Amino acid sequence: MSDITLYSAPSCPYAQRTRLVLHEKDLDFELVEIDLKQTPDWYLALSPTGKVPLLLHGEEKVWESSAINEYLDECHPEPPLMPGTPLLRARARIAVDFANVYFAPLYYKLLLAETPERRTAMAQRLADTLEEMERYGPGHHGPWWLGETFSLADIAFYPFFERFPVLAHYRGFELPGECTGIAAWLEAMRARESVQAQGEPASFYVEAYSHYADGSANGSTAHEMREA
Ligand SMILES: N[C@@H](CCC(=O)N[C@@H](CS)C(=O)NCC(=O)O)C(=O)O
């Protein structure tokens, strides 16, 4: 029996990051799916944030996907998902931080935007951000976000791109045509075994995110992303 339990939700991009890490490292784990539309009280008591993912490693809890993923990489170093030099590790952390602080919130804000004015403004901000990512992101020094080395940076960004069909469906938003490096990286990501094993089809996400698009989502993530 595995000593790793992952509390997850099939639609959650942050939990998908951790499922990808576990798969890349070929680690056995027990998966517990949480229904975030009605988060059970026992989970709210267990989780320090009430969010997924939460990792239980033996008796110890680790939460926040970026922290979980580095923790797993340190506990189970093969294959490594952080680069081999301090400089590239710094670059990986900068990319993950950017994904968390700028990129992911814009994804949610565009989906949650209720007025045409706000939708236009958020779409513009997301397009500008993608164009900025295109300038320093994948395709410049190799196929992956940091160049030759596949890393936690790729894993931090990918789940949001897997959910881009939701933005196309509800907001008519597509990856800007100039983002050819990102488009090629996305193809390389889709070819990975971990992504094929831990992904869902577009139709699943379109259905799963309908409450974000129609304004009825009332979980903590929707509240936080609406406010910020
Ligand atoms: N910063 C957190 C974000 C996790 C997060 O926002 N998870 C969402 C699901 S995608 C959640 O559990 N939300 C609870 C809710 O909406 O009630 C991480 O990286 O793990």
Image (spheres, rainbow, N blue to C red):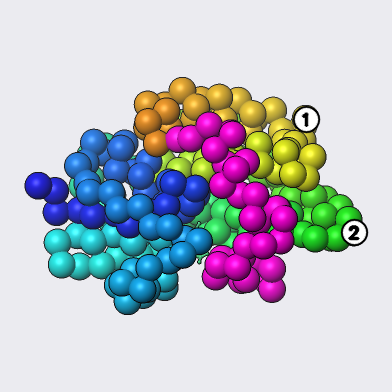
Q: Quadrant of the C terminus?
A: bottom right
Instruction: Specify the segment rendered in magenta.
Output: 199-228
The label shown at residue 115 is: none
Q: Mainly helix, strand or loop, the magenta region?
A: helix
Is residue 209 part of the magenta span, yes or no? yes
Is residue 171 part of the magenta span, yes or no? no
Report whether 64 appears left or right of 2: right
Circle 2 is placed at which residue position? Answer: 117
The label shown at residue 177 is: 1
For disc 2, the neighbor class at 10 Å (few under 14, some 14 to 19, many from 20) is few
Question: Residue at left 60%, top 25%?
Answer: 184
For disc 1, the neighbor class at 10 Å (few under 14, some 14 to 19, many from 20) is few
**Disc 1 residue type (three-letter):** Gly
Number of marks in the rendered image: 2
Disc 2 to disc 1: CB gap under 8 Å = no
Q: Observer-nearest residue: 173 or 77?
A: 173
Report whether 117 appears left or right of 122: right
